[in-house]
């Protein structure tokens, strides 16, 4: 079978995620009482409550427990390390922390960033910029 003769499968995700007929009677009707604790007779209805979609159940938030944000940071660091060369210009001076709620340094490191096109940029280096 050639590439042109293969069938195309189309899945409309809106309909997949909105198939509430199996969970609620008359799903298109506005009925906020169906989410009250006394009217939820099964456990799976409890997991799709409107006011708790970011807390529990099969539709929980992708950013829960900062897993999504951590993954974004790891991907960003991978792209930076793959496309640039980073060199510290510090001479191994002592790191002096700033006493705050968040971690920070009193003297941020001086970093030389070299790109693929041999361009250079200096970060936190007042005499180099």
Image (spheres, rainbow, N blue to C red):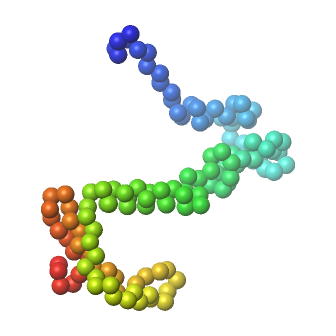
Question: How far from the left and from the top, in percent, is residue 41?
Answer: 84, 42
Question: How far from the left and from the top, in percent, is residue 94?
Answer: 38, 89
Please indicate whether residue 77 sits to the left or right of residue 43 in the image. left
Query: Quadrant of the rendered structure where residue 42 is?
Result: top right
Q: Is residue 85 or residue 53 the one in the foreground?
A: 85
Q: Residue at x 35, y 12 (%)?
A: 2
* Residue sitting farthest toward the left: 118
Q: Is residue 52 or residue 101 the one in the foreground?
A: 101
Please indicate whether residue 50 sits to the left or right of residue 2 in the image. right
Question: How far from the left and from the top, in percent, is residue 29?
Answer: 68, 36
Quarter containing the N terminus: top left
Q: Is residue 12 or residue 106 the one in the foreground?
A: 106
Q: Is residue 111 or residue 4 the one in the foreground?
A: 111
* Residue sitting farthest toward the front: 92
Q: Is residue 57 above or below residue 110?
A: above
Q: Is residue 36 above or below residue 127?
A: above
Query: Quadrant of the rendered structure where residue 98 is?
Result: bottom left
Q: Is residue 23 above or below residue 53?
A: above
Counting every numbered tag in the picture gives 0
Q: Is residue 34 visible?
A: no
Query: Quadrant of the rendered structure where residue 89 is?
Result: bottom left
Quarter containing the C terminus: bottom left
Please indicate whether residue 51 sits to the left or right of residue 124 in the image. right
Please indicate whether residue 64 sits to the left or right of residue 90 in the image. right
Q: Is residue 3 visible?
A: yes
Question: How far from the left and from the top, in percent, is residue 55?
Answer: 66, 56
Q: Residue at x 51, y 29 (%)?
A: 12
Q: Residue at x 27, y 68 (%)?
A: 86
Q: Residue at x 54, y 58 (%)?
A: 67
């Amino acid at each position: 079978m050639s590439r042109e003769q293969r069938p195309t499968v189309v899945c409309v995700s809106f309909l997949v995620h909105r198939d509430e007929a199996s969970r609620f009677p008359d799903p298109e009707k506005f009925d906020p009482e169906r989410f009250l604790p006394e009217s939820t007779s099964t456990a799976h209805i409890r997991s799709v409550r409107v006011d708790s979609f970011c807390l529990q159940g099969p539709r929980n938030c992708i950013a829960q427990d900062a897993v999504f944000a951590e993954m974004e940071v790891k991907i960003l660091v991978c792209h930076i390390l793959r496309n640039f060369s980073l060199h510290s210009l510090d001479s191994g001076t002592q790191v002096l922390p700033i006493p705050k709620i968040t971690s920070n340094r009193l003297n941020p490191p001086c970093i030389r960033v070299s790109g693929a096109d041999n361009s250079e940029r200096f970060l936190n280096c007042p005499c180099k910029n």
